[in-house]
Image: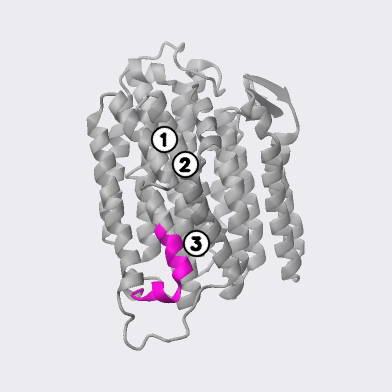
Amino acid sequence: MSYQSSIWPLAAVLISLLGALPILASDRRPNLRESWTILIAFGKVVIVASMLPTVLNGGGFVFTIAEVIPNVPIQLRVDAMGMFFALVASILWLFTSLYSIGYMRALDEHDQTRYFASFAVAISATLGVAFSANLLTLYLFYEMLSLSTYPLVTHHQDAEARTSGRKYLTYILGTSIGFALPAMLITYQLAGTLDFTQGGILAASGADASTLALILVLFIFGFAKAGIMPFHGWLPAAMVAPTPVSSFLHGVAVVKVGVFSILRVIFHIFGPDLLLQVHLGTVITTLASATILIASLVALTQDNLKRRLAYSTIGQLSYMVLGAGMLTAVGMTGGLLHIAMHAFGKITLFFCAGAIYVAAGKKYISQMDGLGKRMPITYLAFFFGSLSIIGMPPFGGFISKWNLATGAIESGQLILLLVLLVSSLLNALYFFPIVYRGFFMPAAEGEPDGIKEAPLFCLIPLSITALCSLGLFFWPGLFLRLARMAVGL
């Protein structure tokens, strides 16, 4: 792949970071503040999309910010894998911005300016991770994301929010500093570089299997945003945040940054061939399989809708890591592809959870009987999102899970196929009762008659993302092509 020097990667990162300034300046003018938010979100999509044709033609872009360590510049680089993640994140941030306007206004939330400004900084950090050319750059933006999302997690400023915020930072910063940073230092000592390179940089380092295993485990647990157990507790705790935060940051951006970082390490620091040679794929798939099954079982026990979605997310994130750990082209493609398919499905489910809260004031599944008859669009969208996460045709989740299942068979690891099938059944067991109760159970006695659909600014985004989950089954070509390019196919 040939890279041309360009300012566009930096522009994609900076547009929302600098955009936080006019958002803050418009504190007393909500309409202007929200107009800035939508304009910036749309601009970010346009900038990212403008680089897509070059990437699809086998090219890319690079921009060096500074070189503070020999052979390790702070550098942005747009390749197929980064473009894949940047497209997902920027498109869904646009929808989330629209949704946030309806949600925050409907509930008359406090400190909305701080909320929108923090969101803008967070999406800049997300794009920075997507376009990082090496581990150092990725690590800096990873930490920037951790700090910028703290005000969002603690938005309500009550005792529960502050406790959850402390837990969030303890997990996220504690693991990145305690595990990922030492792993990065060891990698630099062995390889003399931290660049993301096709085939990896550790193969020529001469490190023994035990050292490589140590580095791998440190990275997997160090990027705790991926939710690999036992470093997953921050994610359910962070559900105290407003639903748009849960939907985008804890259903798409934050958690996917963790997975994306692990996939970068597997693909471009170790390389599949080295991991096969020292038999470390089993370490990855074992950790992922355990997380998938345990998180799915815990999700079954959750009555709070957002907590059920949170544990579902923990399990689904490990599908992506599982695919990468298969170390086959099809399995790795499936793991990367699931980032997009899960993102569209899960953001739909979180949007629906927020719409239910806005319209009916309900958080608990046991209180939602009969709501589907009063909020049919929201519940139909929830059904669509559920089917995609379960992996049922004709929804996008089927495409990624099909690749994962094929990868498990090709690698001769039929136990992983069993994990995929059992977990998909568990997905159905914790999603279908929600839809059934909404459409087919009678409303509780004394339920007010005035419940109806949430405002249009909430309803339109969840309808669009639900339809996207359907459309990605029929037209997965763009994301599938980028995923295959990323794994070298």
Report the residue marked by disc 1: 335
Q: Nearer the viewer, residue 130 or 427?
A: 427
Q: Residue at x 44, y 21 (%)?
A: 270
Q: Nearer the viewer, residue 100 or 374?
A: 374
- Rendered image: mark on residue 351: 3
x and y, in percent, of residue 221 in the image: 39, 38
Distance from disc 1 to disc 3, alpha carbons, whole Å, reads 24 Å
Locate residue 432: give its quadrant.
bottom left
Q: Nearer the viewer, residue 319 or 470?
A: 470
In the image, residue 129 sits, relative to residue 123, either above or below, namely above
Distance from disc 2 to disc 1, alpha carbons, whole Å, reads 7 Å
Labelled pair 2, 1 in contact (Cβ < 8 Å): yes
Secondary structure at badge 3 equals: helix
Number of numbered discs visible in the structure rendering: 3
Q: Residue furthest bottom?
A: 446
From which residue to which does the magenta span run?
Answer: 368-383
Labelled pair 1, 3 in contact (Cβ < 8 Å): no
x and y, in percent, of residue 198 in the image: 52, 19
Query: In the image, is residue 236 part of the stretch drawn in magenta?
Result: no
Query: In the image, is residue 371 part of the stretch drawn in magenta?
Result: yes
Is residue 241 something that shows in the picture?
Answer: no
Mark 2 residue crowding within 10 angstroms, few (<14) / some (14–19) / many (20+): many
Q: How is the image coloured?
A: one colour
SS assignment for the magenta stretch, majority: helix
Distance from disc 2 to disc 3, alpha carbons, whole Å, reads 18 Å
Quarter holding the N terminus? top right
Report the residue marked by disc 2: 339
Mark 1 residue crowding within 10 angstroms, few (<14) / some (14–19) / many (20+): many
Q: Give the left or right position of residue 109, taking residue 67 as reference.
A: left
